Image: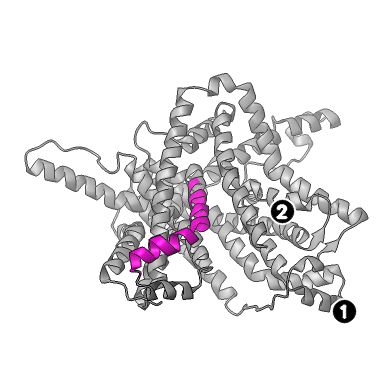
Amino acid sequence: MILGLSRTWSLVGYLIAAIIILPLLAIIAQAFVPDEDVFGHLFNTVLPTYISNTILLMLGVCICALLIATPAAWLVAKCHFPGRKAFQWALLLPLAMPAYVVAYVYTDLLDYAGPVQKTLRFWFDWQAPGDYYFPEIRSLAGASVVLALVLFPYIYLLARTAFMEQSSSLQHASRVMGCGPWQSFWRLSLPMARPALAVGASLVAMETAADFATVSYFAVPTLTTAVYDTWLGYGSLSAAAKLSAIMLLVIFSMIGFERFARRKQQLFQKQSGPNETSVSKLTGLNAVLATAYCSLLLLFSFLLPFVILLQYAWDYFDESWNAAFWEYSFNSLYIAAIVSVIAVCIGVLLIFIQRISPRVSDILPSRLASTGYALPGTVLAIGILVPFTMLDFAVNDLYEYFGQAGPGLVFTGSVFIIIFAFCIRFSAIAIGSVENSYKRISPSLDMAAITMGLKPKALLWRVHMPLLRKGIFAGLLLVFIECMKELPAALLLRPVGFENLATYVFQFVSDEQLEHGALAAIVIVLVGLVPLIYLNRSLEQEN
């Protein structure tokens, strides 16, 4: 906080923040509008099931993800075993895989007509479903496991970093005091990593609450599917807004609870150089078990679904390689490119204002703008439809007032609304990436530049931008891949006749014909691999 910016900078910051929180305000306002008893009917019939399923799903996914991610993070951070270097980045790959694709693959493998149950019936001579028990994949538990397989890298990445940053002197002290490796993990490493685990679990819970495609495919009714069905099935924007408000209440309560639970968990460590000295070398059976655990986790979360996708794409290549594939790929790419650039510009501008201005009020816009990511895609879509539907009506009424034919759905009937929604949802990612890069630029550099007579624009363009290159590039990549994968908002907001790769693949998944959409799914996965590999390399260089 070293330079008094003009009020114009502050106004621009508040204008951006106001636009980003507009859907949230619209949902709250629309939730108080009376509807035609649709919400009352839902409240008396299925709403308790929606709420309980949402909470149970979030808990189930978080527990499963914690159970599989924490051991993997600790092994990679604290132990030497065959394949450790490869597993460090390979265990992040599941993030590139759309959850509904994984759901389809495992349903195809594990349901009654799938190859697994067929083989079991052949081996044991079972003739009917009553002859044996097999877990139902299309269930709440099945959805929890599938989502955990895709989302566990959020916890793995944060926990791995936390374990690697733990001081080696503490580990040595625990060994001197008689703690074995297991006791050292349970009584020292795990409690110190709890804040990172809590943050990772909260990210997993938010992604779970926002998931639409997987729970829809598994026929598990949650608040996300309820919002979608209420809007498209009943056509009631007010009832959909009420459901969205309940969903936001669940999400913000969860975030508040997570922060309340770890409010006193402040751990300070004195880093004493590289921690490679504290890494234990596993030998014999322990090394085999560690490699086997990480291999199986990677196999079931990424390799198996990806190989099956490749097989589908190979078998149905002639049917998939068509004009529609190219058109929808282009739609996804240009929307993701536009949104990435806009989101990064928003991030740079808001964080620059926050860093340079001495006014406390200038911190608020960046904080408000970061709330967009907490809005699930379906909720965000409803929040955007409310004001832009009114705006479309107002434009057409204005044309009629002057005796002209109205232009129709200018906003809600064009691609603009998808770009607008994606910018609001993913600006928080760009803001976080830019803010993280700004923390590495010493304030003394700003003071030196200002002493030499640089104005704010010159300071941003000539000093900060060159130093922010890596953070900006990372933000561009992350926003780009999220745009390629985002499905619920695109499903609700797409204009008539418009498709992108995510909606295109989901249509085939819904029709139980992923074979024909496998090529498009592979494009989504491959595009998602690029930022993951880049970010992992950046983390390794920092370490």
Q: Residue at x 78, y 65 (%)?
A: 276
| Residue 534: x %, y % from top left | 60, 50
Amino acid type of disc 1? Answer: Val
Is 142 left, or right, of 497 in this rendering?
Answer: right
Is 519 left, or right, of 47 in this rendering?
Answer: right
Amino acid type of disc 2? Answer: Gln
**Disc 1, disc 2: CB below 8 Å?**
no
Q: Which residues are magenta?
A: 454-480
Q: Quadrant of residue 462?
A: bottom left
| Residue 245: x %, y % from top left | 40, 59
Residue 471 within the magenta-colored segment of the rendering: yes
Up/down of 182 relative to 85, above or below = below
Is 540 left, or right, of 176 in this rendering?
Answer: left
Q: Is residue 243 visible?
A: no
Secondary structure of the residue carrying numbered label 1: helix
**Disc 2 crowd, CA 10 A, few/some/many (<14, 14-19, 20+):** many
Q: Residue at x 59, y 27 (%)?
A: 515
Instruction: Name the quadrant of the N terminus.
Output: bottom left
Tag count:
2
> For the stretch drawn in magenta, what is the main secondary structure?
helix
Which of 462/169 is in front?
462
Q: Which residue is mark 1?
A: 176
Q: Quadrant of residue 319?
A: top right
Q: Which residue is mark 2?
A: 88
Q: Is residue 470 visible?
A: yes
